[in-house]
Each structure stands twice: as structure tokens, then as C-alpha cells.
Image (cartoon, rainbow, N blue to C red):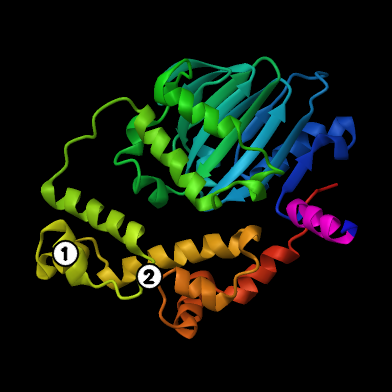
Amino acid sequence: MGTVDSAEAAGRARAIRCWSTEDVEPHNALSYWRESICDSMLELEIEAAAGSGFSARLEQCQLGPVTLNFLGATSQQVTRSRGAIARSDKTEFHLLYLAAGEFQLDCLGRSTQVYSGDSVLIDSSEPHSARCPQPTRCVILQLPRDWLRAWVLDPQSLVGRVLRAQNGWPAALAAVISALRPGELDTLALPGGVVAEQIAALLTLSAGWPRPPVSRRDDLYRRLLRVLQDRYHEAGLSPTEVATELGISPRYLHYLFASNATTFGRQLTRARLGRARDLLSERRFSGMSIGEIASCCGFAEASHFARCFRECYGSAPAAYRAGLGRQGTNIAH
């Protein structure tokens, strides 16, 4: 039994990447931290007062398509300048939840104070800075741009707006994020991708305003994508069935996909592959065979699933799962 427990513990450790200034000499702490953050998360310019005894720690892991960063640091100033943006190819959104401390956020020409319990959405493609006069602890969720837009119609309208956690949906959003622990994600009752979607849904509800008006065509297309997300597991799902559910003709369905430079089959396969990747990434499902995962995700044949997965992610499903298992804890020294 001890051997099994040790193996499980090692598996959890392999899922977490960690960087800490405790691993370097104090006089190298700030430069080490700058390099670590730029390599692991985002190109940033970081400053700290001379002789301040700077220290920081970052733990990073995956929650489905979202990268979680559990970060704690002493007093610092962090800047995402236009120069840093030009040097980086990352254009994702960051949802920051402040667990402890406070800081001043300068973003899109506005200056706002962020307090413990607050959440704020930041666009990595826009300049911003944060002045942290005291130690802070936060959780930063790296949200893929296209993925977030499937939940939030206009995420840019939320950027820089602080969501206060006193009550309502922002409180629910804060409660979910604050409950996440880097060493406990494998014990969640739901797959990481599903939990990530719940967070995106709570972010949408926390916005506190009605959904912006959209054209009927755009609204139908969003509903089409939602149906595919809800019914991806049905192996025989056809355009006619989906069109009937939405009260449109199959011909108009195909027109909507073509207007967005895609097809019904491509988007359905994308939904299925995304779910399959979640299952392959979750250790709780390590007992499922590749064929069982293919079937759960709506693929009629395991060989077809394997071919599609390889084309999308660059490796066969079994190799993808094995690669995750071989990843060691990445602690720089």
C-alpha cells in the first residue's frame, strides 16, 4: 500500500511546476524571479526596492485548457510594457484573484485599487502595471483567448474592471478560485476542463450587465457551438439533428459555419478532441483505455480518434498521456 501511495504522490508532484527564490542566493533573487516569470508565464518587467529582501514563489499547473499560477511575493512593481508585449507572442487573458494583500492596478488609462478577495481580468496584449507595496498572494488563471470568447461575448469590456467579492456572483467566483489548491486538483469531483468552464461561466455572471445585443446570425452561431459542446459525445450526431434542435434548415446551418470560416465537422471534432484531451490529462481517468475515451467523446472508431488527435496535438493519445506522466517537477536552481 505504501508503494501505491508513494506513486500517487509522485504523480501529483509531476503535475506541478515550481519556482522559488529560496533556491538561489538572496542577491540573485530578483533576477531569478524575472527570468522565471518571463519563461513560465508572461514577459514582464519586475522591480523591487534595493535591500528589501525580495522573495517569491510560483506553483503552476493545468486545469483543463487553463493554466493556474499560485503566486506569492514580497513588495514589488510589475509592468507589462509595450516593449514586453512586442517581445512576446502570448495574447491570452489573465484572470487574477487576490488572496492576500492589496495593489494598485494601472490599466487602460485607469488606476484602481485591488483588495484581498477581489478579481480582475487583464489582457496580456495591453500595457498595464501593478504596484504592490506589501506582500501579496494571488491566483492567476491564464485563459486562452478563443476559449474565453466562447463564454464571454466581449471579454475586452471586462478588462481592468475590479470584481469586488462582497456578495453576488463575484463572491461566488472568488469562492471557487480560492478553493483551488495546486496539490489537490486531482481530487476534484469534476474534470479540470469542466471546473474551468464553471469559472468562465461565473466570470460571465459576475460582469453584472445584460449580454450585449448581437445579430441573429451571430447568436445562432454561438448557440450552434454550445449545442456541439453539449452533444459532442453522440457518435452519430448529424447537422440535420442540430439544425432541427435550433429550428433552422441544414443549409442555413452550413452557411453559418462557412461564414465563420469553418465547418460543422471541424467544430464537432474540435469539441470532441478538447474533451478527450481533458480525459487523457486527468489521472482519475488513467484506467480508461484509449478506445473507451474515444467512445466517450463521440468517436465511432479508436483509429479515427487517434489520427485526429495526432493531427491536432502533434502526438498520439497514448503518447500524449505518457508524456504527461513523464514530466517531472520543474524546479530551477
* Closer to the camera in the image, 130 or 312: 312
Report whether residue 54 is seen: yes
Q: Report the side of 264 relative to 39 (left or right).
A: left
The spot of residue 3 in percent (x, y) is 88, 61
Of marks 1 and 2, the one in the foreground = 1
Q: Quadrant of the N terminus?
A: bottom right
**Residue type marked 2:** Thr
Is residue 188 left or right of 13 when viewed as pictured?
A: left
Look at the picture and state if 30 lies above or below 165: below
Tell me if residue 8 is in the magenta stretch.
yes
> Residue 34, which numbered label?
none
Which residue corresponds to the image point at 47% horizontal and 30% vertical from the top-left?
A: 173
Write down the quadrant of residue 80 in the picture. top right
Name above or below for residue 208 compared with residue 333: above
Residue position marked by numbered label 2 in the rendering: 269
- Which residue is label 1 attached to? 243
Residue drawn at (45%, 67%) of the image: 273
Residue 219: percent from the left, percent from the top? 18, 48
Q: Which residues are magenta?
A: 3-13
Tell me the quarter of the picture where residue 42 sits: top right
Image location (x, y in percent) of residue 290: 57, 76
